Image: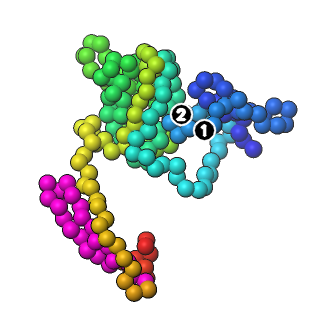
Amino acid sequence: GSLVKVQDEAGNPMEKLFGTWHSNMAPLDLTEGYMVQVNKDTTLDISGKPAYGSKDWVSDLMQGYNLLGYPSNLEQDAVCAFKPLTKQGLLVQVNDENQNPIFYQDSSGEWIDKIGKLKPGEGYYLKVKDDTSLTINEHLDDNCTSPDLPDLVVSNFKLVGSDTLEIKATITNIGNKAVNINTQLDPESNPAY
């Protein structure tokens, strides 16, 4: 194969020694980043269900450099994602895999963003001034705010006949109004059911 070595942010390796793979790394974590060394251009095929499932991910960061995996399945404005660290005065710099940075420019007093959007499955190298944690919220918009998402309350559902599901639901928080929905799903006409 083409895999030579995998290394976590602490430098702990997984590598082949004397014909056998050995690992000193902790179990894989969605919020951590990993360096992978191969000896030729390689495509990594991964199968199975995505590991996403939470709206928020918390990544513990150590003073100095950290390799952060971006765990969301949605792109997000990079400045928004790291805003909690900039507000606390803890962020020094972020780099993507192409060395595009986010950094503070003293002369202008502003954060300069050359990354743009954080992308699913990508890793980012960031430096912080002290031990801290970062919560990634995948529902932040480009104004760094979490939009008011409607609340869905399913009040009743029942099987009608042998193959149709009737759902009665109420969606609230839409302009301070409640909207009632009554629908029937037929598995023959709705393959998602």
Q: Which residue is mark 2?
A: 32
To which quarter of the image does residue 58 belong?
top left
Residue at the outermost left position = 176
Q: Which residues are magenta?
A: 163-184
Q: Quadrant of the N terminus?
A: top right
Q: CA gap, disc 1 to disc 2? A: 8 Å
Q: Is residue 145 left or right of residue 93?
A: left
At label 2, which amino acid type do we have? Answer: Glu
Visual colour scheme? rainbow
* Residue 28 - label: 1
At label 1, which amino acid type do we have? Answer: Leu
Q: Quadrant of the C terminus?
A: bottom left
Query: Residue 115: image x %, image y %?
Result: 39, 33
Query: Residue 88: image x %, image y %?
Result: 32, 20
- Residue in the picture at 25% in, 55% down: 150
Q: Is residue 176 above or below residue 19?
A: below
Q: Is residue 168 visible?
A: yes
Question: Exactly how many numbered labels are in the figure?
Answer: 2
Q: Is residue 98 visible?
A: no
To which quarter of the image does residue 128 belong?
top left
Q: Is residue 108 left or right of residue 5?
A: left
Query: Residue 180: image x %, image y %?
Result: 21, 68
Classify mark 1: helix, strand or loop. loop
